[in-house]
C-alpha cells in the first residue's frame, strides 16, 4: 500500500484551492453570460445535488478501503476495468491543466505583463508546477497550507471593502426570463463539483480517517466561493454589464478603495489567482503521474515532463481568446461534466457490485 503522507485537513485545503480557482475565476464568465442575474440562484439549486454526489463519493471511499482506486478496481475486476476508468481520468487531467494554464497565462499577460510573450509566461509557470509535482503530494499540501489563509483573508478583504459600492437590490427579481437560463448554468457548476472526485485518487496518500461531515463542509465552502463573487459582481456592475466582463473577480479588485487616498490594490489579486492556479496544476500533474503504475521515480518524472511538453505544445497553437472562450463554453465544460458523471457511474458500479471471483485474489 502506498505510503500516506498528508492529513485529511491538508487534503481538503488542497481541494479548496484546486476547485476554488475554477469556481471563483474561470467559471464565473460563463455563469454570468448564461444566467445573468439568476446565476447566483443556480449555485443555490446545485447545492443539494452536490451534497448527494459527495455522499456517493464517500461511499466509494469507504468501499475501496482507502487503497489506490485504480489498483482496487484492478484487483476486483481486472486490468481492462481499471483502464476504462484510467483513460477518462487522464483526459480530464490533461484538459484541466491546459485550460488552467492558458487562462492564467492570458490573465497575467493582459493585466500586468503585456510585453512578455504568452508562451514564456506559460512555460515558466508550468515548469514551477512540474517541479512541485516531482517534489510530491506532501510538498504540495504544505504549500497549500501556507497559501490558503492568505487567499481567504484577501477574499474577505475585497468583499467587505467593496460594500460601499454594492447594491444588492440588483440580485432580484429572479427568473424574469423563466427557469431556463438557470438550468442551462447547472452543467457548468456540475463540472466544478465533479472535480471533488479527485479525492478518490489521492485517498491512499491520506493518513487518518476521511469523514463525511468535513467532506460535505468542503462542498458548502466551494459553493460559497462561487456564489460570493457572483453576487459581488452583480451588485457592483449589474447583471448585464457583469455578463460582458472577461474576469469578473479581478474587476472587483479594481473597485477597492480605502478612504480617499488608498486604491489600486488589484495587485493583491495576483497572489490569490497564482496560488490557486499553482496548486491546481501541480496537484493534477501529480495525480496524472500517480495513477500510472510505475514505481521508479525517474519514470514518473519522465511522465510529468512528457505531459508538460504535450500541454505546452497544445498551448502554442494559434487560438484567440474569443475562440478559447467558445471552446470552454461549447466543448470543455459540457464534455467534462458528462465524463465526471460517467466516471461516477463506473466507479459506483465497481464499488457496489460483487467482485469478479477470478480477480479477488489476483
Image (tube, rainbow, N blue to C red):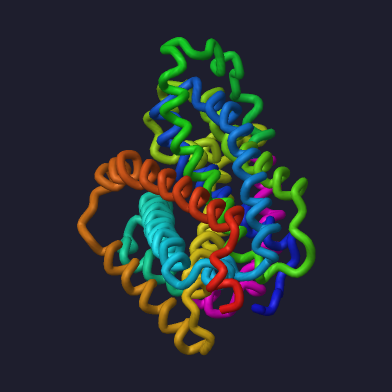
Residue that appears at 42% across and 22% down: 181
What's the magenta bit mostly, secondary-structure-wise? helix
The picture quadrant where one finds residue 210 is bottom right
Which portion, as a residue range, is magenta?
A: 129-158
Give the tally of numbered discs. Answer: 0
Residue 118, position as x, y percentages in the image: 32, 61
Q: Please, is residue 71 above or below residue 111 in the view?
A: below
Q: Residue at x 54, y 16 (%)?
A: 170
Residue shown at 53% from the left, 43% from the top? 23
Q: Residue at x 51, y 39 (%)?
A: 249
Query: Is 224 included in the stretch rendered in magenta?
Result: no
Classify residue 140 by image quadrant: bottom right
Q: Position of residue 131 (x, y in %)?
A: 51, 77
Q: Position of residue 265 (x, y in %)?
A: 57, 45
Q: Nearer the viewer, residue 225 or 253?
A: 225
Q: Residue furthest left?
A: 318
Going by the picture, which residue comes out furthest to the front? 357
Q: Which residue occupies the foreground of this view, 175 or 324?
A: 175
Apparent side of residue 156 relative to residue 29 in the rendered image (left or right): right
Q: Position of residue 184 (x, y in %)?
A: 41, 28
Q: Quadrant of the N terminus?
A: bottom right
> Which image quarter: residue 161?
top right
Amino acid at each position: 500500500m502506498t505510503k500516506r503522507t498528508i492529513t485529511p485537513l491538508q487534503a481538503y485545503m488542497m481541494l479548496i484551492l484546486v476547485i476554488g480557482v475554477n469556481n471563483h475565476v474561470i467559471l464565473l464568465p460563463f455563469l454570468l453570460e448564461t444566467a445573468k442575474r439568476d446565476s447566483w440562484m443556480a449555485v443555490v439549486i446545485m447545492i443539494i445535488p452536490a451534497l448527494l454526489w459527495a455522499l456517493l463519493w464517500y461511499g466509494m471511499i469507504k468501499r475501496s478501503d482507502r487503497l489506490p482506486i485504480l489498483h482496487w478496481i484492478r484487483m476486483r475486476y481486472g486490468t481492462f476495468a481499471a483502464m476504462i476508468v484510467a483513460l477518462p481520468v487522464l483526459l480530464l487531467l490533461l484538459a484541466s491543466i491546459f485550460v488552467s494554464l492558458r487562462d492564467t497565462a492570458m490573465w497575467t499577460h493582459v493585466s500586468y505583463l503585456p510585453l512578455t510573450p504568452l508562451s514564456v509566461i506559460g512555460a515558466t509557470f508550468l515548469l514551477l508546477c512540474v517541479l512541485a509535482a516531482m517534489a510530491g503530494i506532501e510538498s504540495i499540501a504544505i504549500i497549500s497550507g501556507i497559501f490558503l489563509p492568505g487567499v481567504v483573508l484577501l477574499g474577505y478583504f475585497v468583499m467587505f471593502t467593496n460594500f460601499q459600492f454594492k447594491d444588492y437590490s440588483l440580485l432580484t427579481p429572479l427568473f424574469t426570463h423563466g427557469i431556463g437560463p438557470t438550468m442551462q448554468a447547472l452543467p457548468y457548476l456540475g463540472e466544478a463539483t465533479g472535480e471533488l472526485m479527485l479525492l478518490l485518487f489521492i485517498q491512499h496518500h491520506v493518513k487518518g480517517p476521511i469523514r463525511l461531515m468535513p467532506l460535505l463542509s468542503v462542498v458548502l465552502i466551494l459553493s460559497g466561493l462561487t456564489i460570493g463573487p457572483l453576487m459581488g459582481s452583480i451588485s457592483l456592475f449589474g447583471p448585464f454589464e457583469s455578463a460582458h466582463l472577461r474576469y469578473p473577480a479581478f474587476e472587483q479588485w479594481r473597485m477597492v478603495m480605502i478612504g480617499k487616498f488608498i486604491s489600486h490594490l488589484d495587485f493583491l489579486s495576483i497572489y490569490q489567482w497564482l496560488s490557486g492556479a499553482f496548486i491546481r496544476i501541480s496537484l493534477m500533474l501529480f495525480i496524472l503521474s500517480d495513477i500510472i503504475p510505475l514505481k521508479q521515480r525517474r519514470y514518473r518524472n519522465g511522465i510529468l515532463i512528457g505531459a508538460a511538453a504535450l500541454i505546452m505544445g497544445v498551448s502554442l497553437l494559434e487560438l484567440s481568446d474569443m475562440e478559447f472562450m467558445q471552446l470552454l463554453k461549447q466543448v470543455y465544460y459540457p464534455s467534462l461534466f458528462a465524463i465526471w458523471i460517467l466516471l461516477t457511474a463506473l466507479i459506483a458500479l465497481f464499488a457496489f457490485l460483487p467482485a469478479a471471483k477470478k480477480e479477488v485474489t489476483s
